[in-house]
Image: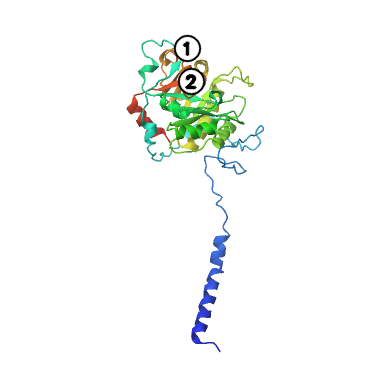
């Protein structure tokens, strides 16, 4: 015979069991991942492993890359529709680490110094470097001490090449307190959308990073011998630049050289910051009328922390302007 207390206890247990096995919890457990995707980025069909950055993802051709449905050529009608869409206001960006905001005086040497005339690189307060695998194993702490206030690091080339030292350089430059960004070398025998996908797949979207860079130039050593018309060049660039801006939330920087600029970029992309190669004369003489933000003034730089030569650059502005730009541009 059960006592009233025991009966009440049994009743409560049964009621709780009904709650935990009812359709409400089952419905919650049965809900799968949201099918919603962003309208700006097409994700690869396969999950891309995050990893610790020590491995190297290699693809053959276009295998494994989900290309955009958008073409490299945009019709005038489509361009007008896009132009009518007001861009979203970027979220406020955090202040970069104090180490990256301190401007170090440059102590670089140059194996082949150039007389630039009245205005020289030394007239600029903020110097930096750009690097790739060809600089080998870099001591980033020493490089920072030599006056590297920023660094552009090569990440990708075309649609299937990743610089083998990119991830190591990316981590080490940050650890040394150097604001750094990644650049992509454009390959004219491949679609712009697949190249943008490849860059996005390999370059982290990271707070404090400098804007991404699109490197466009003619390369006589490349296996690709195509030299598209100016119209096609500009359309390919727009596809690539728009895709990166949507993904990273930063306006990309355009790097170029004199011959490519003369053929394609006079008057183009007035709203993008330019990084100009000009190793024999001041940019004002080589790129008349073009506003620039970064100037690559040497390909024969010498520095502690690097064996061999390194590219040297300056920011157009004083230390205060650098800190303001860094606060706005670093994602």
Residue drawn at x 51%, y 37% is 204
Furthest residue toward bottom: 1
Mark 1 and mark 2: Cα distance apart in space:
12 Å
The x and y percentages for residue 272 are: 44, 27
| Quarter in which the N terminus is drawn | bottom right
Residue drawn at x 50%, y 77% is 12
**Residue 290 or 275: which is nearer the viewer?**
275
Q: Find residue 233 and report its image quarter.
A: top right
Q: Which residue is mark 1?
A: 112
Decide if residue 63 is on the left or right side of residue 184.
Answer: right
Q: Which residue is mark 2?
A: 311
For disc 1, the neighbor class at 10 Å (few under 14, some 14 to 19, many from 20) is few
What is the number of callouts on the image? 2
Scheme of colours in the image: rainbow
Residue drawn at x 58%, y 34% is 198
**Residue 171 or 299: which is nearer the viewer?**
171
């Amino acid at each position: 015979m059960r006592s009233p207390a025991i009966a009440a206890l049994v009743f409560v247990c049964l009621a709780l069991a009904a709650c935990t096995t009812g359709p409400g919890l089952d419905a919650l457990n049965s809900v799968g991942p949201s099918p919603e995707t962003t309208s700006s980025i097409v994700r690869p069909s396969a999950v891309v492993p995050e990893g610790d950055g020590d491995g190297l993802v290699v693809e053959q051709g276009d295998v494994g890359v989900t290309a955009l449905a958008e073409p490299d050529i945009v019709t005038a009608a489509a361009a007008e529709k896009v132009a009518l869409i007001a861009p979203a206001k970027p979220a406020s960006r955090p202040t970069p680490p104090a180490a990256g905001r301190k401007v170090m005086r440059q102590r670089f040497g140059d194996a082949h110094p150039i007389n630039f005339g009245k205005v020289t690189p030394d007239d600029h307060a903020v110097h930096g470097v750009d690097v790739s695998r060809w600089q080998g194993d870099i001591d980033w702490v020493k490089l920072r001490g030599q006056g590297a206030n920023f660094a552009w690091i090569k990440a990708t080339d075309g649609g299937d090449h990743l610089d083998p030292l990119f991830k190591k350089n990316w981590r080490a430059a940050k650890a040394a307190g150097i604001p750094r960004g990644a650049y992509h070398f454009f390959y004219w025998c491949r679609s712009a959308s697949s190249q943008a996908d490849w860059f996005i797949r390999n370059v982290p979207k990271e707070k404090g990073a400098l804007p991404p860079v699109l490197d466009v130039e003619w390369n006589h050593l490349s296996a690709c011998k195509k030299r598209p018309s100016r119209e096609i060049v500009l359309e390919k660039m727009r596809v690539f630049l728009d895709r990166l801006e949507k993904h990273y939330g930063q306006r990309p920087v355009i790097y170029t050289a004199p011959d490519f600029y003369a053929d394609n970029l006079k008057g183009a992309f007035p709203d993008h910051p330019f990084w100009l190669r000009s190793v024999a004369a001041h940019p004002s003489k080589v790129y008349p009328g073009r506003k620039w933000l970064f100037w690559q003034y040497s390909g024969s730089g010498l520095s502690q922390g690097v064996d061999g030569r390194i590219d040297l650059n300056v920011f157009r502005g004083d230390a205060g302007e650098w800190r303001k730009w860094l606060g706005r541009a670093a994602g």
